[in-house]
Image: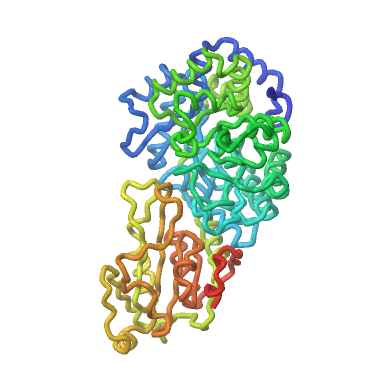
Amino acid sequence: MALVDLKAKPYQLNQEQIDWVEHTLGKLTDEEKIGQLFFNLFMLNGKDYNNTQLTNQDILNKYHIGGARYEGGTKEDVQNLLNELQTHSKIPVLVAANCDSGGNGACKDGTYIASAAQCEAAQDTRVAYNAGLVAARESSALGVHINFDPCVDILQNWRNTIVNTRAYGTNAETVIKYTNAYIDGFNAERDMITCIKHFPGDGTEERDQHLVLGVNELSVEDWNNSFRKVYENHIERGVQMMMAGHIALPEYQKHINPSLEDKDILPATLSKELITDLLKEELNFNGLVVTDASHMLGMTAAMRREDYVPLAIAAGCDMFLFFNDLEEDFNFMLNGYKNGVITEERLNDAVRRILGLKAQLNLHKRQQEGTLLMPESALQVIGQPEHLEMQKEAADLGITLVKNTLDELPITPEKHKRIRLYMIENSEKDGIYQSDSTVTANIIKELESRGFEVTLNDGSTRVKGKTLDYRKEVDAAIVIANIVGYAAQNNYRIQWSTAMSNEIPWFVYEVPTVFASLNFTTHLHDATMVKAYINAYHSNPTTIKALVDKITGVSEFKGVPNDNVWTEKWQAKL
């Protein structure tokens, strides 16, 4: 078993820090060690996924959690929660957020800079650097220490929408280029921890491991020539954490252990072959491995929860992401240790890695000095003008004209005063990510401010009317796909409002028609008939303004698409 070396990369602790780790480890009870293995999810939106009525202080005292993540909340809400956790925690808690696009992943009012797909389209590493820089500035003001990003997956399969906007490219070299820039920005001003994901790599198939076991089908040779290069790059650069995906790598697993049959294949989170043998020993990763969220079906479908909770740690993962039921999962893990599923050596190694990251951040010193809690004044950095300028620059560089084969752009109020606006949206009740309800109003306001007369289409009917009348009443059509979703479908595609809805672009030869996606980059697959197609990557007001600037010819298009946008359809290019 590969044991951690706290003097080596990525820890590189001094003797004082190592002494604190060993002294603290030596004083922990078995129950306290078990608690350190868990990240708990704290909800700021009134929901309770942990099946508990315990207060936050009770959770800390009873379950001794090592890490915290949270969901929802304004900057004040989040900072108050994190200060409360650190106030009542015996050992400082590692706090994580998902800041893949800037500070908006840390709180509701954080600043979006650019998604990974937008960074690639911008063709400028400065955009990725700024996304990382703002992520660190704004999340650290709240009390966050760890970024569960960037995503270093390679988007080889255009049908994959779970990492469509979170992947920085379609090959290892591009992913390395932009994720390096993002991490450089993230580390530029703050001592924080980066956690890349999702080992052994997503993006080769179309399914979502939230809903089914993910499978990276690559051969040993193909994986070594792609994903391995990405992980080796980041290990060499000193990344501290990796998130293991609920993703199998069957060819490699069988290469390491030829006795495995198909029925024995497990997701990386439960696979000794992938976490211990490949990642920690062969790739020499000396940092900390955390599981992806344990309520995902890629993990839960493997075996009973009572078995996979401790097996994740036995396989080589060091922290377990999220309880289902606090008491039950804690006891599953504790019993796994008592029953020998988790050896004492493995438990101590995992806890040593966890404490090592806390020592690297000097959280123990900050706790003693009274500087661990974040002051309200720190929140002033969130949404500051400099960050909004970075957002504006990213939108200008990233928005991508994929095609304009009928040369219909620009659309101007002088030539196309009467606009028919089509808003294509999906509806997920209680979704993790939901579309902003103000988007339609913002788009109409922006268009009208330029002198257009805008009529919003009703897509709930099939009625199209006479085409000649349509041409008399409408000067141009703008179709906006505001499709947002996460973990409720394996793939997010365009879903029209009704069967043969009048919003389906039947009008592309009747009037100049522009189609723009505000999120996913592959909607051409469902709308190959449109002749002017744009990827805009986000729906914030800055992006909407920049999009209208480019549609109207005020600003030129600068983004560059990758080949996935064509979805392997020749007609998409027409």
Residue 556 appearing in the image: no
Residue 176 appearing in the image: yes
Residue 2 in percent (x, y) is at 70, 25
Q: Which quadrant is the N terminus positioned in?
A: top right
Q: Residue at image x 34%, y 83%?
A: 474
- Quadrant of the image occupied by residue 376: top left
Q: Nearer the viewer, residue 183 or 514?
A: 514
Q: Nearer the viewer, residue 527 or 60?
A: 527
Is 304 above or below relative to 222? above
Residue 539 in percent (x, y) is at 43, 60
Residue 342 in percent (x, y) is at 57, 18
Q: Residue at image x 45%, y 28%?
A: 304
Is 160 above or below relative to 313? below
Q: Which quadrant is the C terminus positioned in?
A: bottom right
- Please name the colour scheme applied to the rendered image: rainbow
Left or right position of 104 against 180: left
Q: How many numbered discs, if any? A: 0
Q: Residue at image x 30%, y 25%?
A: 53
Q: Residue at image x 30%, y 66%?
A: 498
- Quadrant of the image occupied by residue 120: bottom right
Q: Nearer the viewer, residue 282 or 118?
A: 282
Left or right position of 513 against 353: left
Is 226 above or below relative to 539? above
Residue 214 in percent (x, y) is at 53, 44
Q: Which of 284 and 478 is in front in this view?
A: 284
